[in-house]
Image: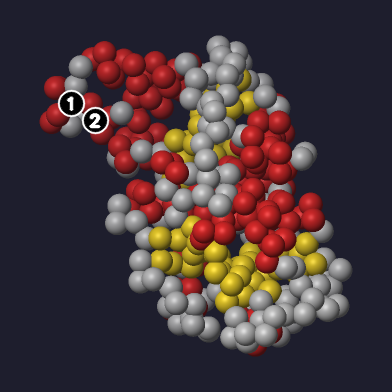
Amino acid sequence: MNFAKTIAERRTIRKFKDETVPFELLNTLLKQASSLWKSEEQSHWRCVYYESAASRLRLAESMFAKVTGSQLGKFIPSKLTDFLTKSVLSTPVHLVFIAESAANRRQCDENYAAVCSIMQNLQLLGWENGLGMLWYTDPMLNYPSFFNEIGLKVGEKFAGILNIGYFDRSPKARKRTPAEQNWTEFMTDTKPRINTNDHYVSSPDILEIVNIAVWAPNDGLREPWRFIYVTDPESVAKLQPSPANTSPSFLIVVAKKEADPHKQEEDYAAVCCLIQNFQLLASCKGWYVRRTIPEWVYERRLPIPLNLDPQERTLAVLEVGTAEQIPSSSSTPSTLNVIRL
């Protein structure tokens, strides 16, 4: 796959053809999407596959129960609820993704990042196979009837529904803000770095693929991300999670904190997709990229003065170098768990 081309050309699709999507195809694409997620830790996630008319009707009823079952429900025109139900029934496949529970917040974030990244991979692979998708979340889904329908357990996190189908028309592109406008290079030494034989990746090279990676699914185009590239050896040494790692630079991805919890979760997912795009593009360049969530992210104890806004949070720290210098770390494959309804 030409990742750069597919990432830039993929669009959100809301209207699908009345054409069956083979389960075998989606299952194969889901396995491929899972294999593209690289992590040293085992990620725990699962998905529920809705394809039959009966299961899609049941899903629709659970999705809108918060509205229809409320005091205001009697004031909602039946035409509106019929339209919403019809939109679910006319979508060939719904894939519900769930991040499983974990013992601590860091592992919960790892599981959520994994499922969001795999959803993005699936969208890219689907686009290559003529499939359009809509990543759907809505506050009205935060309701017991929906959680019961998808089998959400205590401690688990609903990541979203991918509406999937073949389509006739692709919408026009919406502009993205150039990464340079959300970019800082952190240096404690004002001397320019000499690109010797240390396999350092230059800022222009990083920016080149970040400007493609920003074509990530992003509701309302809020573009919550900001990038801090740490290149000088003194700061890099302070960010090293262990003495065994010798990355010559770090790309730190931070995001604004939304007051609305639902938007905050959507923004987290969008940044996860951007990071996954970056890793796919970096692999094509032959770079080494290792994604980490250091403990200082939660302690707000920064090893270097990053000058974060109080309303910003660090979502990931990417070790960046070239594959020739840094041996590829072992990757734990993600376990595929699909419930077909």
Task: Identify whether 338 is placed above or below 214.
Answer: above
Circles 1 and 2 in contact, beta carbons < 8 Å: yes
Task: Identify whether 181 is placed above or below 77.
Answer: below
Of 320 and 100, the residue lying toward us: 320
Which image quadrant for residue 291?
A: bottom right
**x and y percent of residue 254 in the render?**
49, 64
Task: Give the amino acid type for the residue marked by disc 2 in the picture.
Answer: Val
Task: Identify whether 17 is placed above or below 211.
Answer: above
Residue 160 in view: yes
Of 171 and 64, the residue lying toward us: 171
Mark 1–mark 2 distance (CA, rounded to whole Å): 6 Å
Residue 23 in view: no
**Label 2: element kind:** helix
Q: Write the residue at 72% across / 48% down.
A: 35
In the image: residue 69, left or right of residue 113: left
Whichever of labels 1 and 2 marks the residue nearer the N terminus, that label is 2
Q: Which mark is residue 283?
A: none
Of 48 and 194, the residue lying toward us: 194
Instruction: Identify the residue position indicated by label 2 in the image.
Output: 67
**Label 1: element kind:** helix
**x and y percent of residue 307 in the render?**
45, 77
Instruction: Identify the residue position indicated by label 1 in the image.
Output: 73
Which image quadrant for residue 255?
A: bottom left
Crowding at label 1, few (<14), some or many (≥20) Cα neighbours within 10 Å?
some
Crowding at label 2, few (<14), some or many (≥20) Cα neighbours within 10 Å?
some
Of 311 and 99, the residue lying toward us: 311
